[in-house]
Image (spheres, rainbow, N blue to C red):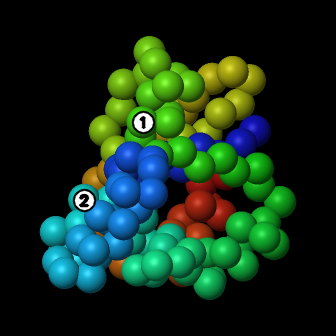
Amino acid sequence: MKLLFIYNANSGKLNALFDAGHKLISPSTYKCSLCALTYDTFAENRAWKNFRADSHLKMEFYHKDEFEAVFPSVKLIYPTILKLENHQLTTVLTPEVIGEIPNVEALIERLKLSV
């Protein structure tokens, strides 16, 4: 079993630069609530990084363009967190639920309860 985290952002350095600028200028309109929880403006959130390092969970991270290249027949609204188990994808957290999570610590608790 592994968790798949799909960000509502495209891959690439130019996109990363644009996203960082968006977070600085207008964080309330930033379109990726999962990015906002797990990353600070320029780097991965320390609590999130520690959770990932200490966790026994297998995790994979995708930008939406990367996910769509690997799973072309799966249609999703982003961001989302999925579980891949026995070649079957199931939703762990929907975009709406992720958007309501107030901070990275609450995200970590939700993940621990969900798997």
Residue plotted at (27% across, 74% down): 21
Numbered disc 1: secondary structure: helix
Q: Which residue is mark 2?
A: 31
Indicate whether 10 appears above or below 74: below
Mark 1 crowd level (few <14, some 14–19, many ≥20, 10 Å Cα): some
Mark on residue 11? Answer: none
2 and 1 marks in contact (CB < 8 Å): no
The residue nearer to you, when weighing 96 against 114, is 96
Q: Tell me the CA gap for discs 2 and 1.
A: 15 Å
Count of all numbered marks drawn on residues in the image: 2
Numbered disc 2: secondary structure: loop
Identify the image quadrant of residue 78: top left
The location of residue 41, given as percent across then percent down, is 40, 80
* Left or right side of 96 for 50: right
Residue plotted at (45% across, 48% down): 11
The location of residue 61, given as percent across then percent down, is 59, 49
The location of residue 100, given as percent across then percent down, is 31, 67
- Kind of residue at badge 1: Asp
The location of residue 26, given as percent across then percent down, is 17, 77
The residue nearer to you, when weighing 86 against 25, is 25
Residue plotted at (83% across, 60% down): 56
Foreground label between 2 and 1: 1
Identify the image quadrant of residue 52: bottom right
- Kind of residue at badge 2: Lys
Indicate whether 90 appears above or below 47: above
* Left or right side of 93 for 113: right
Q: Earlier in the sequence, mark 2 or mark 1?
A: 2
Considering the image in quadrants, where does the N terminus appear? top right
Q: Which residue is mark 1?
A: 65
Residue plotted at (67% across, 75% down): 49
Whether residue 16 appears in this view of the structure is yes
